[in-house]
Image: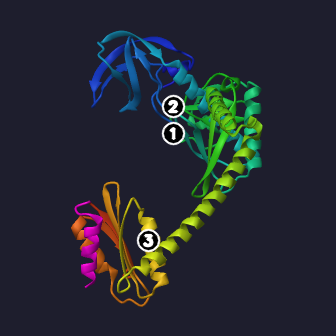
Amino acid sequence: MKDLLYYVDSTIQQFSAKILHIGNDGRDYVVLSNTAFYPTGGGQPHDTGWLNDVEVIDVEKIEGEIRHYVNGQLALGEITGQLNWQRRFDHMQQHTGQHILTAAFVELFNYATTSFHLGTGFVSIDIDTEEISEEQLQQAEARANKIILENRSIETKWVTKDELTEYNLRKDVAVDEDIRLVIIPNYDYNGCGGTHPTSTGQVSQLKIMATEKMKKQIRVHFVCGERVLQELAMRKIVLTDVARQLSVPEEQAATALKKVMDSAKATDKSLAEAQEALLQYEAKELLAGAQQHIVAMHFENRSIQALQKLARFITQLDVEAIALLAANNEDKLQFVAARGQNVTLSMKNVAATALAIINGKGGGSDALVQGGGEQTISASELLKHMENALK
């Protein structure tokens, strides 16, 4: 393994090799005499690039061979490999940033990292603690960026299992052979098969973006290098737009937005109260025109939630009442049936009749049911069937 080009020199962007084998395991692939393409492993995604002019779309280590999955045809013989260097260097920055941040959490708080994920957006580590404060996050981030700024060397070394005792490893090594250490002297010693730059300064910068609880651990999301600038640019665009719409300077956007949100919540509350009052008034009007305490009314574009509230108001105002309400909502026919406290008839029978007619689904209790289905008949015709079901 130590002779693989991506281990010999992680900065190699172009190389020459021979195609030893061409195969297909559901996808076309080639196996080379040597390669600078890193295969997926250890939390780090695969490289992409080109073999001659043929695109390499995936690289995996399978059955002891490194398969380069290609989007095109190649023949046995000499080829020139070219890495997508922007992707590779980004992975090197993020992976090395993970080593540095993980070591910072261990050094400062003795919080071990249990897993690592390098995605296309944020990078994440799960740390072995149930709680972490904002101050601790700031301290770990500051320590990591100090190590980056110091531009410390990053060394790689192949060792035997017996030689591991010479190093203060952050965690136990999971393999017995081909043991590769990635070392930031006097800071971090870790068994790792990934690719890394030659110094911490090449990580450029690290920013913790968010945290979330994961069972009994904390997941920390962060970005490094170019991704920090990308996140900053995106947030700058959003902040500028928000400030413009609020007609305030950017530094006052959060305060102004809170005022808008508070005002909107107050407006929503007032509107909800007004709607409740209107529904109560409507319930009284409908009861005034009811015959034998039965209110049957159909509507256009009245939500099922509004129908439920109206039905409850009707049956609260008159404990002897039965409310049968239906509405055409876009391409659906929906209904609600409810009874007052003194009524013993089950509304489930009404629902069963209605649902069978409109090929619908619904549910509820003996006191209140709701459902919806196809517009096989009009809302007024559905109400007649529901009234008949009462009899």
Q: Which of the pair 329/41 is nearer the observer?
A: 329
Q: Is residue 381 highlighted in magenta?
A: yes
Residue 205 in picture, x, y percent from top left: 69, 29
Q: Which residues are magenta?
A: 375-391
Q: Residue at point 57% right, 64% down?
A: 272
Kindly identify the amino acid type of the residue bearing the numbered disc 2: Asp
Q: Tag 1's secondary structure? A: loop
Q: Tag 3's secondary structure? A: helix
Residue hosting label 3:
308
Q: Which of the pair 79/343 is nearer the observer?
A: 343
Kindly identify the amino acid type of the residue bearing the numbered disc 3: Gln
Most common SS among magenta residues:
helix
Residue hosting label 2:
178
Residue hosting label 1:
175
**Closer to the eye: label 3 or 1:** 3
Q: CA distance from mark 2 to mark 3?
A: 68 Å
Residue 128 in picture, x, y percent from top left: 63, 52
Kindly identify the amino acid type of the residue bearing the numbered disc 1: Val
